[in-house]
Amino acid sequence: MREEKMINNGWKFLFGDYLEAKETDYIDSEWYDICLPHTFSLPYFMENEFYVGYGCYRKLIVIQKKWIFKEISLIFGAAFQAAEVYVNGVLAGVHKGGYTAFQIPIAHLVREGENLLFVRLNNLWDGALAPRAGEHVFSGGLYREVSLLVTDQIHVNWNGTFVYGEEISQEEAAMKLLTELVNKRDTEVTCRLESVISQGGEELEKLVELVKLPANSQVTKESAFWISSPSLWHPEHPALYLLKTRLYVNDCFCDLYETTFGIRYFKFDKEEGFFLNGEHYEIQGANVHQDHAGWGDAVTRTALGRDVQMIKDCGMNFIRGSHYPHHPCFAKACDEKGLLFWSELCFWGTGGPDADGYWTASGYPVKEEEEAGFEKSCMDTLEEMIRQNRNSPSIVIWSMCNEPFFSAAQVQDKACHLARRLVEKSHELDPSRPAGLGGVQRGDFDLIGDVAGYNGDGASLYIHPDVPNLVTEYGSVVGDRPGVFSPNFRDTAECRYKWRSGRALWCAFHHGSIFGDMGHMGMIDYARLPLNTYYWYRKELRGIEPEEEHKEGIPYGLSLTTDRQTIRTDGTEDAFLIISLVDKEGRILSNTAEVTLRVEEGGGLFPTGTSMVFSPENGRFLDGQGAVEFRTAYEGKNRITASAEGIGTAELIITGQGGEVWQGQKRILPQPPPYKTGMPVPPEGTVLSIHKPVFCSSCLEGHPASCLTEENEEIWKAEGSGQWVMADLEGTNRVTVVEIEFAEKTAEGYRVLYSCNGNEFTELSAGIVKDEFLLSYHLVPTKMRYVRVCFHGESQPLKRIRIYG
């Protein structure tokens, strides 16, 4: 009989490489006491720097006597990014790749009673591992759950079922079922495979088949079934079905494996847009990163569900999982709550100092010796992503990459070739879904997959492209609460063309970033409190009027609220706490304050420990509010207070359910990393603008503004007076040189301006004209994101905008 048990509590952790700690007689009494999910970066609050190196984990696990002749495995939800797993001092398995789950068989290494589990983990940049580059942060850690899986020697393989439709209509669904069966015995057996399909407790179909399993084998059984008048999955009515797979040998019950799936049909059309269940359906959504305030990437299942619900609540129907495979529970939350989901591989590029050794390198390797390993890493991760999520009806596309054109010029063709191989592999692994590519507004990537996703200025560069498409990123506006009541539309993203399947805002939530302030682009902040952009969408899409604007007033007290009074203690749940400064009538004020949260009783923790300070200075208390997620690994009551000098105290009770009772146990709470590594300083004279978006007031056909940040012979042209063109570095940088290259001799009638926020511009002065075509500004290092050329009279054709830093 199958048993799966979370083993998230009772771990020991220490920064550094301690391979000797794999031995059972090693003493770890000075190591930190931690629970999973866990990140090297704990606590993490959107810093551009993070710890890079090794971290080691130890835990005692108990093996019951009844399991000794069973199959026993460890299931890791993810580990960033190179993990070695030891059991009782012996290497049990290795996994490389930081975003997908993996299974480590350990039956041959364990004994009855206590056994030592040791994990040696590092997040060192590796040129042969995906991703080589990205704008997110790449913190190490066992940042998703770990469980112990016990099965009979004859069982359904881990992630071993796949249910999908071959022909679906409103009247009937012809479904295909793949079931992977494993026989670990040394003899051949014939098993009875029962597949029962139900909905809402009502049995709809039952398949009974005999399957011969050779000794020590894995066999995939293909089956088919039909459902009349199916309940079709749709964001407005996310109907789900349940498959129960039972295995018997000689009438002896061996295994029960449950699979949730949905039935729907859809298509992306290059002329008509997106259709779901036969009807045109406009995609309206946002991009999502996985990290949360304080906890970083180490996020619970309830926190992931909360993210999905917030996007659903504002009226959106789509999430792009940027830019790596997310927790399978994220897709399951989309299944249950009703959101379409774009699941993406971690083949990722980004603009930055292009040097190996950090996550700003060429997206595709420039060293031949790294090519084979990198391509294998992408292929393996793609297969793992698809296997782990393939039964989720919310997923309508597998994405092969994001902005792969941020690869060195000499390997662009190889990056394209890899993308084609990934598309072919995706079709092989899952014939029921299209393979797309995200961020293909540069290079020749947009014609490779089944669907093209355009980021940034791609919304206007590809007006009616000859491929099915959607805008995968628009907006990219930096801000913090309360923010501006605006949708952040730009560059035709607001246009509802018939051929455009939809659009996705960049982005839903603030997130950690290695690039300056680029993480502050969410419509919801890092602590999961909305900006005014969120309320704009909620009003537009659902008709709900925005929250009352917070105003300054006379503080009367604090309000401390939570979304749940009880939480499980197994690492899967947390409670969301909101602190508000209120007046006598209970209205939330915008005043500043320094508020301290404390755990007065109980064993629960904030990411900072038993207390946490919120203030405008540390960015945790803005517009009169702050928030954080609270966890506990112990059963019992937690009394939490919020206090501010001269204002008063509020308190609430959160109860932990299950596990060890809190009795004031001694523990060594984790400390911040010993050091942090930031993005390498680019050499002076590095071109920051290459491949970056360019926006303009207008352009003539065949003369797009995008050419201004490329190295080609194209020219931007526009007609009429008052035209402008603007390069966007997509984040604030320290700039030393700005060059504007004209296609004709420079003349009067223009201004060159710069900005950090896109709203307030300052004119550059004292430019030097070189050889009558090149205008150059040499600066004391100046923070800027945008460089804009404005023409008073007739516009002049431009060849290049180069920004150095």
Image (spheres, grey):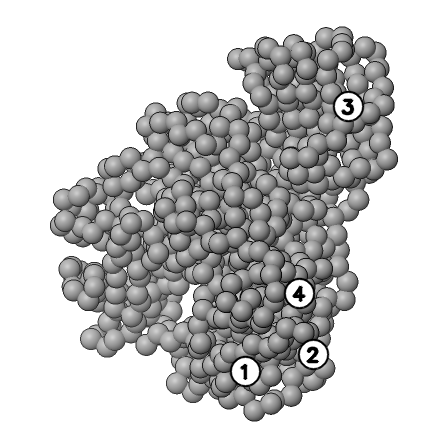
> Which of 94/514 is in front?
514
Q: Is residue 260 left or right of residue 453?
A: left
Q: Residue at x 26, y 52 (%)?
A: 237
Q: Helix or strand or loop: what does disc 4 sit on? A: loop
The spot of residue 451 in percent (x, y) is 42, 34
Q: Foreground mark, 2 or 1?
A: 1
The spot of residue 14 in percent (x, y) is 69, 73
Find disc 2 in the rendering and name its residue: 31
Which amino acid is tagged 3? Glu
Find disc 1 in the rendering and name its residue: 639
Which amino acid is tagged 4? Ala
Cα distance in 3D space between marks 1 and 4: 22 Å
Q: Foreground mark, 3 or 4?
A: 4
Label pair 2/3, CB-CB below 8 angstroms: no
Q: Residue at x 85, y 23 (%)?
A: 766
Q: Foreground mark, 2 or 3?
A: 3
